[in-house]
Amino acid sequence: MDIRNFAIVAHIDHGKSTLADRIMEICGAVGQDHPQQLLDSLELEREHGITIKLKAIRLNYSLDATHYTLNLIDTPGHVDFSYEVSRSLASVEGAVLLVDATQGIQAQTLANFNLSLEANLTIIPVVNKIDSPQANVGQTISELKSLGFTQDEIFKISAKSGEGVKELLNEIIKKVPPPKRLTTSPKLSVLIFDSALDPYKGVIATIRVFGGKFKSGDEILFLATGAKAQILQIGYLTPKPLYVKNLADGEVGFIVTNLKDLVAVEVGDTITLPANPAQPLPGYQQVKPVVFLSFYPADPHNLPKLKAGLEKLKLNDAAIIFAQESSISLGQGFRLGFLGLLHAQITQERLEREYDLDIIVTSPSVSFEIDGKIINKPQEFDPTSKNVREPYAKVTIFAPAKYYGAISNLIYEKRGEQKNLENVGVSQKIEAEIPLLEILIGFYDQLKTITSGYASFDFEIGDYRDANLVKLDILVNHEPVESLAQIIPKERAEEIARKLVEKLKEAIPRQQIAVPIQAAVGGKIIARETVASFRKDVTQKLYGGDVTRKMKLLEKQKKGKKRMRRFGNVDIPQEAFLAVLKI
């Protein structure tokens, strides 16, 4: 049996899932009447037009009277899920690098190209959407040639219509080598590149076998976590699950274990036999969150429901971490860590839809190093700290050359430093180092705005560097609102504080009393706005009489408002917390 293992990699919305549909149709795995983007099974994947979870499909295909088994991996394209891409590329020998002819090479095209080079894969460059009226095929081919490909290597297809896809499939079989071995040892070596939890069966791991053979009933060992489990079932997707007795060297499939805890099964880990363990396969990393937010239920009675929802989501997404916390203004909630803001957004939407929750989300933060201690909550920031460091990111931006000046200004405004500039066709590749905090809040929107939507960017986490940061406290009606506190650059403190209190003034509704909104650094008020009160005319029912009657009513109203200012609570809506993201 001849095996070919390959992945489809591309920037977001360049047509990966549509190409996978056409390949499955040609191989006879599905009929013509199947749903579009069949591998994007989550409702949110279809709505956002992105792949969130990778899929591995086994297909059968014959060429020149030889029967081939093709293992196709459709990978996520967004930077938040890049670790899944790197692990899936470690499981294959070839990569189809897909580029949209209407957009050309984008930031994540280059990121995936570099990941494929590092994995020493056979790369097949493909120009997609050639039938689109906006397609610029010649320009896209020129950009691919600038990466080192020749004209003869580049395929032109339309994944939507199927034009050129069969020829591409034949080329994959001819060019992609048979499965490689990372070890000469006969011991069992299996790489995990995805995992999920079935509440009735247990943890299901998607795997690639690099050495040895295993069968149902075998006891296995997970090297990174030390967990042991028994294999209940073995199979592969066609795209429907098909169960078999065993999997051997070079094959891709899945195993169902008796484990009930997904934490014990980590992407990138090596599975082996406990009686005769192999060495760990290279490249394993522990997935670390880079952005932190707090989720609070709008109705405090829904806290158990929110906790149950998070626990169920974590069963299928081990990258989410959470711990319970409390806030004076918002009550009980959870502090969560994510791989990026899109990861956080997807999680929030799933909680609201699947568990019928209304969630208040606080402003995002990153990890800071304060006097050698890592923190991610503004409340833990000590203003007296002498050694404050923040994480930097290595950013790659692709945009037409005419926007270079505007992008350079944006990098400067975000406290970044430009490192390199290259021409790629009519576009420019700009490399810079920018504080991670600046990238998370507003950078993507501003970049798209100043480049009329043409720019794309990718980033990877770098090192920690010295920073001059302060904690900005927000007080509403003289009471600090912990959930609105932020850690910000000292030189921009007044500018950010002014913008923030102005936004909060618009977001917080008027009350019976005037509501002061203040921004403070180290106890010093640096910005203030006031939400004007409603004025009720308490004298409107008076008809004539002595003026003292009117004065008594006004004095009574004055005392009542004074009491409200002392004891009244101000309702802060979700829009106020969203205002933090809009400054």
Image (cartoon, rainbow, N blue to C red):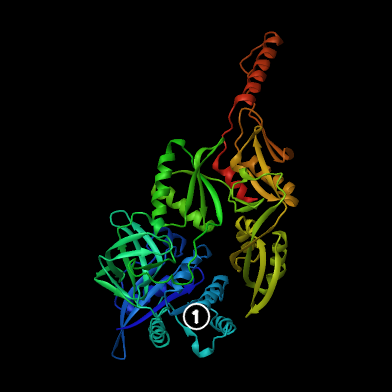
Is 434 situated left or right of 208 in this image? right
Residue 36 at least partly seen = no
Q: Amino acid at mark 1?
A: Asn
Image: 503 above or below 134: above
Front residue of 495/468: it is 468
Image: 238 above or below 353: below
Front residue of 452/30: it is 30
Give residue 6's position: percent from left, percent from top: 41, 78
> Residue 213's image quarter?
bottom left
How would you rate the neighbour count of disc 1 (Cα within 10 Å): few for under 14, some for 14-19, many for 20 or more?
some
Is 384 situated left or right of 251 in this image? right
Is 154 situated left or right of 507 in this image? left
Give residue 532's position: percent from left, percent from top: 67, 33
Is 577 situated left or right of 226 in this image? right
Residue 127 at least partly seen = yes
Question: Which quadrant would the N terminus be assigned to in this image?
Answer: bottom left
Give residue 90's position: percent from left, percent from top: 45, 74
> Residue 206's image quarter?
bottom left
- Name which residue lies at 70% across and 68% down: 418
Q: Secondary structure at mark 1?
A: loop
Front residue of 211/41: it is 211
Front residue of 276/215: it is 276
- Residue linked to disc 1: 120
Give residue 132's position: percent from left, percent from top: 49, 76
Question: In the orientation shown, which residue stands out farthest toward the front?
Answer: 275
Image: 583 above or below 228: above
Q: How many marks?
A: 1
